[in-house]
């Protein structure tokens, strides 16, 4: 694998680093010797990870506690990082969450917060740190999509729409800045073994593409960064996302509906 520190610079910011894919991003970047800014709400988890990475890899780590559903917290994070003159060369917009169920049964306030975490915070962070990357003629930004970015996904309706936004935004930025020395990619995993499904209230899913390991998903992201505007780890996940583009628009949501429908729909027939 290419050396990310040599290619992009010394400091990476990872949002949602307290577990799952974010923690794996932090580990793989620390292995390559990058200093890290770890962001999430769970102070203890971030501090434990920070101590492990500092002692194992000898890197510097800054722990930043922020609730990214609150724009004033996101702005405070940006202001602090700029004040401390931490020059971010790799931004991993990883923090995110979903919710599973009929949209009319879900909590509207939580759905609006999902837009703040999954969309608004990547906009604010990218807008804050991309100009310097362009000026330095080096840097990289990762966005987290999902296989749900590529298709309407009933019962994950709002979530998959936020992930479609990440895909579109990342691919557009990729074209805008690729000649400025900045690489952008949207990583769109299928089902991955993290706490995501449980936090979303989705249980007992049997994904067609199987379950991926966070380690493989993050490796795939870094191996494709600088080569492609977007990547989908796992052949079956890629095939399903590719295939849907040939399905009529009326049929695609109905296929997903039948794949994802919660048990109570089965009971109702
Ligand atoms: N796992 C999958 O199957 C899958 C598939 C496709 C895409 N993804 C995407 O991958 C990304 C990482 O998810 P994951 O699978 O690693 O899930 P996870 O284990 O639930 O981790 C989510 C991370 O996001 C952080 N986060 C959530 N809400 C936040 C908030 N309001 N403010 C700050 N941080 C917040 C959490 O930290 P705190 O709770 O400590 O704040 C945690 O570190 C997400 O964008 C998700 O949409 C996951």
Image: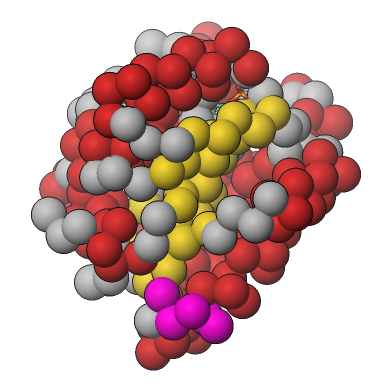
| Figure check: 64 above or below 130 | above
User: Which residue is at the front of the view, 69 or 167?
Assistant: 69
In the image: residue 195, left or right of residue 220: right
User: Which residue is at the front of the view, 30 or 269?
Assistant: 30
**Magenta stretch in the rendered image:** 134-138
Rendering coords of residue 159 (x, y %) = 60, 41
In the image: residue 114, left or right of residue 79: left
Rendering coords of residue 81 (x, y %) = 68, 50
Q: Which of the 4 image quarters holds residue 82?
A: bottom right
User: Which residue is painted at 65% across and 57% down in the image?
Assistant: 85
User: Which residue is painted at 46% across and 61% down in the image?
Assistant: 89
Rendering coords of residue 228 (x, y %) = 27, 71
User: Which residue is at the front of the view, 133 or 148?
Assistant: 133
Q: Which of the 4 image quarters holds residue 90?
A: bottom left
In the image: residue 73, left or right of residue 102: right
**Most common SS among magenta residues:** helix
Task: Indicate the quadrant containing the N terminus: top left, top right, bottom left or bottom right.
Answer: bottom left
Rendering coords of residue 233 (x, y %) = 23, 47
Task: Please indicate, yes or no, whether residue 99 appears anywhere in the rendered image.
Answer: yes
Residue that extends furthest to the bottom in the rendered view of this protein: 179
Q: Which of the 4 image quarters holds residue 47?
A: top right
Q: Is residue 69 magenta?
A: no
Task: Please indicate, yes or no, whether residue 256 appears anywhere in the rendered image.
Answer: no
User: Which residue is painted at 23% across and 72% down in the image?
Assistant: 227
Say how the picture is coloured.
Answer: secondary structure
The total of numbered circles placed on residues is 0
User: Which residue is painted at 26% across and 63% down in the image?
Assistant: 6
């Amino acid at each position: 694998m290419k050396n990310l520190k040599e290619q992009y610079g010394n400091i990476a910011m990872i949002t949602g680093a307290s577990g799952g894919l974010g923690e794996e991003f932090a580990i793989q970047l620390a292995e390559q010797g990058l200093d890290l800014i770890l962001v999430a709400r769970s102070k203890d988890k971030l501090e434990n990870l920070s101590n492990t990475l500092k002692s194992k890899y000898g890197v510097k780590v800054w722990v930043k506690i922020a609730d990214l559903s609150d724009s004033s917290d996101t702005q405070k994070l940006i202001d602090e990082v700029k004040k401390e003159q931490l020059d971010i060369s790799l931004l991993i917009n990883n923090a995110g969450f979903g919710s599973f169920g009929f949209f009319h049964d879900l909590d509207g306030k939580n759905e609006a917060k999902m837009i703040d975490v999954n969309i608004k915070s990547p906009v604010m962070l990218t807008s804050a740190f991309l100009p310097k990357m362009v000026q330095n003629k080096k840097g990289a930004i990762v966005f987290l999509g999902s296989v749900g970015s590529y298709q309407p996904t009933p019962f994950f309706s709002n979530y998959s729409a936020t992930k479609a936004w990440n895909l579109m935004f990342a691919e557009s930025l990729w074209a805008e800045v690729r000649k400025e020395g900045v690489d952008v990619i949207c990583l769109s995993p299928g089902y991955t073994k993290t706490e995501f499904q449980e936090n979303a209230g989705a249980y007992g899913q049997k994904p067609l593409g199987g379950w991926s390991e966070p380690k493989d998903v993050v490796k795939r992201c870094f191996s494709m960064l600088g080569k492609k505007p977007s990547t989908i780890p796992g052949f079956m996940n890629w095939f399903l996302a590719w295939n849907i583009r040939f399905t009529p628009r009326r049929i695609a949501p109905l296929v997903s509906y039948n794949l994802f429908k919660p048990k109570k729909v089965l009971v109702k027939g």
